[in-house]
Image (cartoon, rainbow, N blue to C red):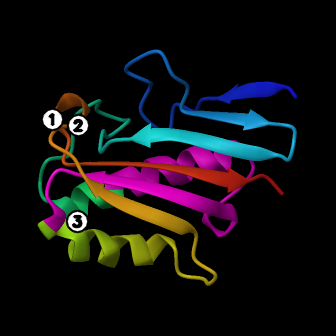
């Protein structure tokens, strides 16, 4: 097995010892690190509301997927971390804009007490690279 880091300036740089994503050659999977709602053009955290934050996170993930040669249709697993489970429906409404074809990826949503940089949401995923 070989692994390759995937990094794009169209998504925020890692703020710790991790890659934006890792592609492996067996069976051609991409592991996308948890993304928080940082705007890559400003480096600022999106704090407006949970829908704006979720949209920013998924836009960052889209940029990483595209850089690796894949897209949301090839995502097989998603992990969502929120600091308030009352945001579940709002997150789902934005999530459905990006994941609009069935079968949907396997997924879990977990409430946590804190996220990096004071973010309200973090999402990671695993995608196949066609």
Question: Is 72 rendered above or below residue 9?
Answer: below
Report the residue marked by disc 2: 115
Label 1 and label 3: CA atoms lie apart by 16 Å
Sequence-wise first label, 1 or 3: 3
Q: Residue at x 53, y 81 (%)?
A: 100
Marks 2/3 in contact by CB < 8 Å: the verdict is no
Q: Is the N terminus in the top left, top right, bottom left or bottom right quadrant?
A: top right
Check if residue 66 falls in the magenta segment.
yes
Q: Position of residue 50 (x, y in %)?
A: 18, 60
Nearer to the camera, 61 or 23? 23
Q: Residue at x 15, y 35 (%)?
A: 118
Q: In this view, does 78 lie to the left or right of 26?
A: left
Marks 1/2 in contact by CB < 8 Å: the verdict is yes
Report the residue marked by disc 1: 118
Report the residue marked by disc 3: 51
Question: Is 53 rendered above or below residue 41?
Answer: below
Mark 2 vs mark 3: give the one in front. Answer: 2
Please report the bounds of the magenta region as a residue range.
Answer: 56-85
Q: Position of residue 68 (x, y in %)?
A: 71, 43
Nearer to the camera, 27 or 94? 27
SS category of the residue bearing label 3: helix
Question: Is 18 rendered above or below residue 86?
Answer: above
């Amino acid at each position: 097995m070989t692994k390759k880091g995937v990094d794009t300036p169209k998504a925020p740089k890692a703020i710790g010892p991790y890659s934006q994503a890792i592609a492996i050659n067996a069976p051609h999977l991409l592991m996308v690190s948890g993304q928080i709602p940082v705007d890559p053009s400003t480096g600022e955290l999106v704090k407006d509301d949970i829908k704006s934050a979720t949209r920013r996170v998924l836009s960052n993930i889209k940029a990483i997927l595209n850089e690796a040669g894949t897209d949301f249709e090839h995502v097989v697993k998603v992990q969502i971390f929120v600091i308030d489970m009352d945001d579940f429906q709002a997150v789902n409404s934005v999530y459905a804009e990006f994941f609009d074809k069935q079968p949907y990826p396997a997924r879990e949503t977990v409430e946590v007490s804190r996220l990096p940089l004071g973010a309200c949401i973090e999402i990671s995923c695993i995608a196949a690279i066609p």
